[in-house]
Amino acid sequence: AQRVTQPEKLLSVFKGAPVELKCNYSYSGSPELFWYVQYSRQRLQLLLRHISRESIKGFTADLNKGETSFHLKKPFAQEEDSAMYYCALSLSGGYNKLIFGAGTRLAVHP
Amino acid sequence: KAGVTQTPRYLIKTRGQQVTLSCSPISGHRSVSWYQQTPGQGLQFLFEYFSETQRNKGNFPGRFSGRQFSNSRSEMNVSTLELGDSALYLCASSLEGTERKLFFGSGTQLSVL
């Protein structure tokens, strides 16, 4: 079955430290991976997509099909990065059906 | 542009009742998806509508249904409510062709007593 695993419920770092939020997926087809973020009292919003290979707010993520991973990274965390991060998988032909991971709460301390 | 609007924001119902939730997508968006969010199961896909047709469905019982109108507004209905239906119901709209960039609403918090 298709699945997205985010092994950490909480990741706590200090400002300026590197951040890596882990995401592994299970899918035998051709996946599309996304990271969505929810800041405090805000709506869930798209952070980045693997297909666009862009860097948003200093975050990057590379799809590793061999390891079935899509980890989110940022070299220097900022306090404003504190939020809930969700990794999501879209299946081939799945239109807007996304399979979400359980989410990781990132807490960046001053 | 106004964002995705969901009404009502909060709902309290009792077991056995039915409920209808509403979602107005961003102007020009023709796809509307619904997700259920609970502490135990996280975010789970319910269904998606595009041009008034359901084109994808998640693994939920038939008590969960939806529809989309010609103006792309969508409603979802839950009949014979159960305690386990208590959740945040999120609606998301998308402009077709933008590779699954979903714009989410604030959600409707449903409590079943």
Image: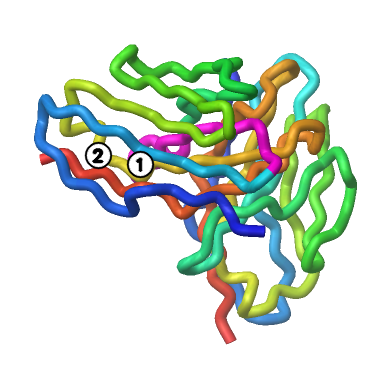
Q: Which residue is mark 1?
A: B38
Q: Which quarter of the image is occupied by the N terminus of chain B?
A: bottom right
- Picture quarter with the C terminus of chain B: top left
* Residue B2 pos. (x, y %): 60, 58
Q: Determine the residue positioned at 62% across, 54% down.
A: A45
A29 inside magenta stretch: no
Q: Is residue A108 visible?
A: yes
Looking at this view, is A51 or A64 the one in front? A51
Looking at this view, name the residue that lies furthest to the front.
Answer: B70
Could you tell me which residue is drawn at 30 percent across and 33 percent down? Answer: B20
The CA distance from mark 1 to mark 2 is: 8 Å
Check if residue B33 falls in the magenta segment.
yes
Instruction: Evaluate if marks 1 and 2 touch, with contact meaning CB atoms under 8 Å apart.
Output: yes
Amino acid at circle 1: Thr
- Most common secondary structure along the magenta stretch: strand
The residue segment tinted magenta is B28-43
